[in-house]
Image (cartoon, helix red, strand yellow):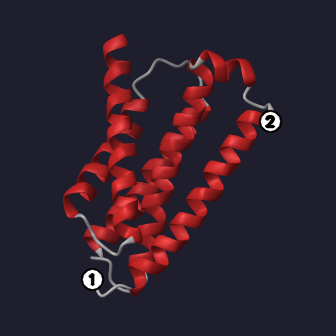
Amino acid sequence: MATYTILHVAISLVGIFSGLIVLHGLLTARRLEGWTIVFLSSTVLTSATGFGFPADKLLPSHIVGVLSLAILAVAIFARYGRHLAGRWRPTYVLTAMAALYLNVFVLVVQLFLKVPALKALAPAQTEPPFVVTQAVVLAAFAALSITAAIRFRDSKIQ
């Protein structure tokens, strides 16, 4: 299972890294086709491989995975099925960035679980350091996603 975990984490990190590049592209009104393919495919794989870990009950990670896959389906349809036409352009931006946010949300959860200094600050992940960190990440993603949707919508890119 250690190899599977390493693979899952590696795919997740590729998704986050490529997603941040795609976000930069959206903020600067550039499509970055190659990075978009890497981001969307690795993010789908991240969510899909998350279901490969043993579990005897429904976990929050399963809910996040299902939610992420549903959001990604809309993003992929908006981008490739509707070719960013009309309302599909901001729909793509907001759903793609929501999927990236969910990956970063899980990254923060994992950091607070695995990094001893962070775990000591928030062992139950209900303590203020964890809650404030997640709130700051959410606020940053909301602001960046809205800005990206506006800038990408107003661009002349077809």
Neighbor class of circle 1 (other Cα within 10 Å; few <14, some 14-19, many 20+) is few
Q: Is residue 44 visible?
A: no
| Residue 49 versus residue 32 in the image, above or below | above
The mark that comes first in sequence, 2 or 1, is 2
Label 1: element kind = loop
The residue wearing badge 1 is 157
Instruction: Residue 19: give x, y in percent of width and height.
Output: 37, 52
Q: At which x and y percent is residue 32?
A: 24, 64
Q: Residue at x 36, y 28 (%)?
A: 8
Q: Quadrant of residue 133?
A: top right
- Identify which residue, 25 or 96, lies in the foreground: 25
* Screen quadrant of the N terminus: top left
Q: Residue at x 72, y 29 (%)?
A: 125
The type of residue carrying mark 2 is Pro
Using residue 112 as the reference point, say whether residue 65 is left or right of it: left
Image quadrant occupied by the C terminus? bottom left
Residue 128: which numbered mark, if any? 2
| Relative to 18, 136 lies left or right | right
Question: Spatial distance from mark 2 to mark 1, Cα to Cα?
Answer: 43 Å
Are the two marked residues, 2 and 1, in contact with CB atoms closer than 8 angstroms?
no
Residue 90, picture quadrant: bottom left
Q: Secondary structure at mark 2?
A: helix
* Residue at (45, 51) in percent of width and height: 100
